[in-house]
Each structure stands twice: as structure tokens, then as C-alpha cells.
């Protein structure tokens, strides 16, 4: 039988046994090798590894590491592409009793150097194509181990090094909300519990073929790597950056993938790219999470994938592992815009806390905290931060509580709704704004593909909600259309002031939207439904200049709506104050509601100045508007001088 044969095994695995949690990853893997030595373990293109071949390669690497570094538990960096060889390197490092630090070759060199310096990795395991980059990062050729150049004479037997479940398996670097990478320390027990949760909730068995779209340095990779290798299944890496999304459907069919896992954004783009005629005869499960899942995502799943396929929404984090699952089948009704993340897995308790750390009740919003003995160990060489974030059991046990920084709401039946990051729920001009709700509403608009919403204060005192939108086609939706669509379903204070339409939103290595890379608004007049009409008179020119400067735009047309340009109540007050200061005219603050364009505001200025000068009885407003630019300017200047004279007399 070929190692990549599609026939099902004669003895698929049963539910993942809880007793495996008392052992290590190599213990479980070696048991699988003994059971399925000739089955396919991993495949990249034409390169395949059976379980026996993978184990022998891993053993040679483990013995090389032990000969080079001894038995000390220490970080070993991995600089390898997503390939079958990557799995052998991971297992080999763990068999040597060490912890791996996965470096993504496509990452910027500065980030990789930062991870190397912080982890103080003893050496880098790499391959020949990446050896040059590895030498640059290592700074010393003796700190490299080339997997392609391993001595074939190295012992290929299991090293048999005793490892407990509390031993560290890897350090995973995550940028977090600050943009500065931090290392999360993860034990064998943590990984085994993630695999147990995935196996038993998703029904992973030895005849499954799992995709791996994630970087090996992210939590999302655990199912694709260990969910396969610790169950006798096969793992198939797919490099989206190199292969492209347009090849993914054919690849899923060709490799007969049964479990496809990705972040929500990647799934959304993939589903939208399908025609509806694709057939995925072996695909039985689509597993998504990492970002908010909307009603539209579920609708896409129902029309683009077979009726025999299930969708499973998840909530997880690097610090907590898997927290919740929410299964969806074609008959599952979804009533809200945002799909819940479901019910807690075994051994994980979900708490919702207020700012003081007190529990909140059902249907109330609170910060999601996870209580378990299967959390990450903490942050690499940051004991104070670890103590602050991983709260110890007050009774002295091994159950700790991690405050995630995410907001949620528990339904009366215990189902959890994920409402985004705590710092995404912001206060703008005194009102609490739910960013996740705005994003869900934007995603429901036709021709909108990806969105990100954030509060920005690019100019002091001008805090506003900015919506970043990528459209499915060109031309994209206008700011006017987006605003009008949102105004029908959101309160006015939640409707973004500014819309930035991009060809594509920036992504992190895992495919999520990279919010830190979103550019500030460029100051260009937004694309509105109405075309640009230039000022016709000096007064309109003057008012338009005040508007443009106050709104931070390069230009403003005389027919442009104040709200569609990004105006709001505080900004309206500032504009009226500037008009008053420069033209000496008394305008009510409500003028921008009554006269929401430059042309209308200029007419209101003429009316007010004419009335203040007593000109209203001498010349009708219509006649005033008909004057030439020169005559109108002279009249306005004369009116302003009269106003200054009255102020001086006062």
C-alpha cells in the first residue's frame, strides 16, 4: 500500500484517552508509531513521510541534539518551511527533552532576531535553503544544525529520555496588543489537553487528513500538527503566501482533506472565491475561529460546502488553549449578527468579570476569564507579568485563572458570545462604542469583503471611529453608501466618521487582520455618491477651507454632506466657532444640521451678515447672492468691519 493511500485504516482510534495527559508528547507519538508504522504521517507536494520514517528522522535529530547539547532543557530554534521535515524536527527536539521556538522564514529579520535574543536559543535547526538566514540569526556557524546534512549513521532508535507532562514543549511568541513579542511557555500537558479537546469534540481519527495553514509558531498549528500525529492521522501543510488562495480548493480536493482549519478571515475569503460548483467529497469539517464569526460567514458555509460537512466555531488563545466550541450544521439557525463561540470544553471554566473582578450575571457583558489546570505556564522570563495575568488558586491548588482581555456575554443556557477585545470596546466622545458590532454590520453589506474598525486620535482632540474596508470588486462601496447602510441599523454615535477603502487589509502571519499595520486616514476627500463641485465664490472658498482643515481633508466640495465627510457634533461646534472668528457672524451651533454643505453654510453666512448690517431691508438675499464675486466680497468685508466697530464700541 502506498503511504499516501486514501483507504481508511482498519483500526481507527477511539476517543483520546485521559490517561495520556499524564505522559508526554513523545510517549503518545511513539505509541502511534508502533500502531501505524506504515501509515502516512505528513505530506508536502511529492514529499511524504510515514510514521516510521518520521520517527526515525526525529530520533536521529534527537540523538544529534543530545550529543551536541546534553540533556539540559533549553530552547532550540526552528527555521524551516511548512513541510513534512518540519514535523520530524519538532518531534526530534521534544524527544531530546528540549523546547522549540518556531521561526517563520518569511518574517522580517528584525522580528526573528528579537525572538532569538529573547529566547536565548542554544542553536537553530534549519535546512540547506534556509542556512544562510540561519547563520545571520545565529551569529555563529557552530549554533546551526542542518537537517538536510544529518549524519545517516546517527542512531535512529528512540532515545527513551523520561519526560513528565509538566516539561516545557515550546515557547510561542505572540505580539499581543502592544506589538512587542512576548514568549508564552507551554507544557506537554497543555498540548495534550488541546489534542484531547479537539479529538473528542471534532471526532479526529486515524483516517483523517488535516490541513495546516497556520505558522508552526501559532496556537492554531496545534490541531494540524499534533491533532494528526497523536491520533494516527495525516497532516498536510499548505503555504498560502507561496501557493495563493486560488489554489486552495483544488488542493483540498486533490489531497482529500477531511478537516480544514483556518482563521475566520481566511475562511471568508476562501468561501467568497468559490463558485458554488466545487465539490469537496471528503471534507467533513470546517473549523474556524481567532476572529469574530458572523451570520454572513455561516451563510457562506451553508451554500459553498456540502450538506454532509459541519462548521465548528471555536474560542481559543495562546495562554488558554481551546476554551469553547460551537458546532453548526446546515440546519442550525443563526439569529444574531455575531455567531456565539459556544460552550466550554471539559476542564475549562469560563467566568465573566467586571473591572473589579466580580462575577457578572447572565446577559451582562464582562471580561472573559478562564479557570483551569491546563493553561500555559506563563511568560518566558517574565515572572511578575505571569503572576499578574495567571491568578493563583487562593486555596493553593494547581487551578489558575487567566483574564483574557476579551469581552463576552453568557446566554442563560451557558452559551458564550464573544464580543471582541476589551480594548476594542472604546469610549468616543463620552459614548461606549462596540467595535465588534460595527464590524459585523459592515460585513453584512454587499460588496464588503474584509473590515476592521478602530478608534483613532491622529490629531489631538479629534477622536473618531475609522472603518477600514476591503471590497469584493471594483468599484468599492462609497463612504456615503456605507454610512447610509450602517445608519439604518446602528445608533448614530456608532456610525464611523471616516471610511478607508483598501485593496486588502494587512494580515498577520496567521491570516488575521493586522490592526497595528492599518494606515492612518490619508486626508484625501472620501469617495462620495456626489461628485466634487469646486467653490464658486470667495466666501464658499473660505468656508470650504475651514471645513477641509477641520476635517483633515485635502479638499471639500460645496455640495458635500458634512456627515459623509466624517463630521460629528464636536467638530461642528469647532467649525462654527472658526466661521464666527473669521467672518464675525453669529451662527447657531445647529447650522450644520440645517445647512450641512459648504454652499448652504455660505448662504447662511450671507443671510446672517446681511441681517446684522441692516442690509436685509436694502437688498434682498436673492439679489445679494446674484452679485459678482468682487461686489459680494466688498459687501461682506464692509459687513465685517461694521461688526468689528460695534464690538469696539461695546
Image: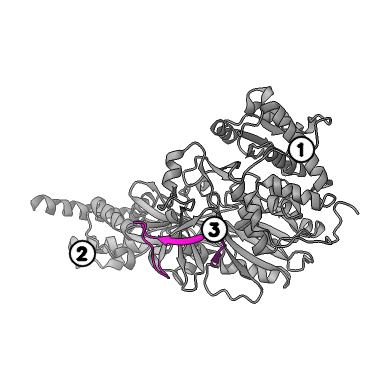
Foreground residue, 630 or 333?
Answer: 333
| In magenta stretch: residue 357 | yes
Q: Main secondary structure of the magenta part?
A: loop
Callout 2 touching callout 3 (CB < 8 Å): no
The residue identified by callout 1 is: 59
Q: Residue at x 20, y 66 (%)?
A: 618
Comparing labels 2 and 3, the label whose residue is closer to the camera: 3
Q: Position of residue 468 (x, y in %)?
A: 51, 55
Marks 2 and 1, how far apart in space? 93 Å
Residue at 65% of width from left, 31% of height from top?
A: 71
Q: Is residue 468 left or right of residue 260?
A: left
- The crowd level at tag 3 (other Cα within 10 Å; few <14, some 14-19, many 20+) is many
Give, as a single range, the part of the protein colored magenta. 340-364
* Closer to the eye: label 3 or 1: 1
First in residue order: circle 2 vs circle 3: 3
- How many numbered marks, from 0 up? 3
Q: Nearer the viewer, residue 514 or 629?
A: 514
Residue 517 part of the magenta segment: no
Residue at left offset 68%, top offset 23%: 142
Q: Which mark is residue 451?
A: 3
Q: Looking at this view, name the residue that lies furthest to the left.
A: 649
Q: Is residue 560 visible?
A: no
Residue 611 is tagged as: 2
Q: Name the secondary structure under disc 2.
A: helix
State which tag comes first along the sequence, 2 or 1.
1
Query: What whole-number distance in Å separates the C-alpha atoms at marks 3 and 1?
Result: 46 Å
Q: Which mark is residue 28?
A: none
| Residue at disc 1, secondary structure | helix
Kindly indicate the quadrant of the structure image that contains residue 345: bottom right
Frontmost residue, 530 versus 120:
120
Amino acid at each position: 500500500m502506498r503511504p499516501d493511500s486514501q483507504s481508511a485504516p482498519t483500526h481507527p482510534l477511539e476517543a483520546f484517552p485521559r490517561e495520556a495527559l499524564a505522559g508526554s508528547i513523545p510517549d503518545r507519538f511513539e505509541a502511534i508509531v508502533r500502531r501505524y508504522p506504515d501509515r502516512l504521517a505528513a505530506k508536502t507536494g511529492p514529499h511524504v513521510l510515514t510514521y516510521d520514517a518520521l520517527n526515525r528522522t526525529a530520533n536521529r535529530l534527537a540523538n544529534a541534539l543530545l550529543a551536541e547539547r546534553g540533556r539540559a532543557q533549553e530552547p532550540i530554534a526552528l527555521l524551516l518551511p511548512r513541510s513534512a521535515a518540519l514535523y520530524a524536527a519538532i518531534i526530534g527536539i521534544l524527544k531530546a527533552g528540549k523546547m522549540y521556538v518556531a521561526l517563520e522564514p518569511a518574517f522580517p529579520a528584525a522580528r526573528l532576531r528579537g525572538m532569538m535574543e529573547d529566547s536565548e536559543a542554544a542553536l537553530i535547526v534549519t535546512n540547506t535553503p534556509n542556512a544562510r538566514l540561519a547563520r545571520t540569526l545565529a551569529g555563529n556557524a557552530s549554533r546551526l544544525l542542518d537537517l538536510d546534512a544529518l549524519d545517516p549513521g546517527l542512531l535512529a532508535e528512540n532515545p527513551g529520555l523520561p519526560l513528565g507532562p509538566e516539561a516545557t514543549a515550546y515557547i510561542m511568541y505572540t505580539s499581543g496588543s502592544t506589538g512587542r513579542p512576548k514568549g508564552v511557555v507551554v507544557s506537554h500537558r497543555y498540548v495534550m489537553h488541546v489534542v484531547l479537546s479537539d479529538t473528542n469534540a471534532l471526532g479526529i481519527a486515524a483516517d483523517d487528513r488535516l490541513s495546516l495553514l497556520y505558522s508552526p509558531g501559532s496556537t492554531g498549528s496545534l490541531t494540524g500538527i499534533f491533532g494528526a500525529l497523536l491520533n494516527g492521522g495525516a497532516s498536510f501543510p499548505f503555504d498560502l503566501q507561496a501557493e495563493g488562495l486560488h489554489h486552495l480548493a483544488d488542493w483540498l480536493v486533490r489531497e482529500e482533506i477531511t478537516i480544514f482549519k483556518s482563521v475566520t478571515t481566511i475562511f471568508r475569503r476562501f468561501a467568497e472565491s468559490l463558485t458554488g460548483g466545487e465539490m469537496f467529497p471528503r471534507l467533513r469539517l470546517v473549523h474556524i475561529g481567532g476572529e469574530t464569526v458572523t451570520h454572513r460567514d455561516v451563510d457562506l458555509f451553508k451554500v459553498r460546502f456540502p450538506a454532509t460537512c459541519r462548521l465548528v466555531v471555536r474560542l481559543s488563545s495562546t495562554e488558554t488553549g481551546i476554551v469553547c466550541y460551537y458546532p453548526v450544521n446546515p440546519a442550525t439557525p443563526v439569529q444574531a449578527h455575531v455567531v456565539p463561540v459556544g460552550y466550554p470544553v471539559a476542564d475549562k471554566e469560563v467566568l465573566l468579570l467586571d473591572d473589579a473582578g466580580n462575577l457578572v450575571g447572565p446577559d451582562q457583558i464582562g471580561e472573559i476569564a478562564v479557570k483551569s489546570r491546563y493553561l500555559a505556564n506563563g511568560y518566558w522570563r517574565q515572572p511578575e507579568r505571569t503572576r499578574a495575568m495567571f491568578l493563583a488558586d487562593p486555596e493553593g491548588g494547581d487551578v489558575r485563572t487567566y483574564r483574557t482581555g476579551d469581552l463576552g456575554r453568557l446566554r442563560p443556557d451557558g452559551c458564550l458570545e464573544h464580543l471582541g477585545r476589551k480594548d476594542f470596546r472604546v469610549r468616543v466622545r463620552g459614548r461606549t462604542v462596540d467595535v465588534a458590532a460595527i464590524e459585523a454590520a459592515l460585513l453584512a453589506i454587499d460588496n464588503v469583503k474584509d473590515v476592521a474598525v478602530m478608534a483613532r486620535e491622529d490629531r489631538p482632540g479629534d477622536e473618531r471611529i475609522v472603518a477600514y474596508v476591503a471590497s469584493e470588486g471594483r468599484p468599492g462601496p462609497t463612504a456615503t453608501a456605507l454610512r447610509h447602510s450602517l445608519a439604518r441599523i446602528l445608533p448614530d454615535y456608532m456610525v464611523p466618521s471616516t471610511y478607508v477603502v483598501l485593496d486588502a487589509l494587512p494580515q498577520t502571519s496567521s491570516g488575521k487582520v493586522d490592526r497595528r499595520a492599518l494606515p492612518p486616514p490619508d486626508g484625501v476627500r472620501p469617495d462620495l455618491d456626489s461628485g466634487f463641485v469646486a467653490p464658486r465664490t470667495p466666501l464658499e472658498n473660505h468656508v470650504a477651507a475651514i471645513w477641509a482643515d477641520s476635517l483633515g481633508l485635502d479638499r471639500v466640495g460645496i455640495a458635500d454632506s458634512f456627515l459623509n465627510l466624517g463630521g460629528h457634533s464636536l467638530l461642528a461646534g469647532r467649525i462654527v466657532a472658526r466661521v464666527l472668528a473669521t467672518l464675525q457672524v453669529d451662527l447657531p451651533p445647529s447650522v450644520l444640521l440645517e445647512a450641512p454643505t459648504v454652499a448652504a453654510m455660505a448662504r447662511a453666512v450671507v443671510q446672517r451678515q446681511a441681517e446684522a448690517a441692516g442690509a436685509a431691508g436694502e437688498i434682498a438675499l436673492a439679489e445679494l447672492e446674484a452679485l459678482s464675486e468682487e461686489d459680494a466680497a466688498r459687501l461682506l468685508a464692509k459687513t465685517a468691519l461694521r461688526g468689528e466697530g460695534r464690538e469696539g464700541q461695546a
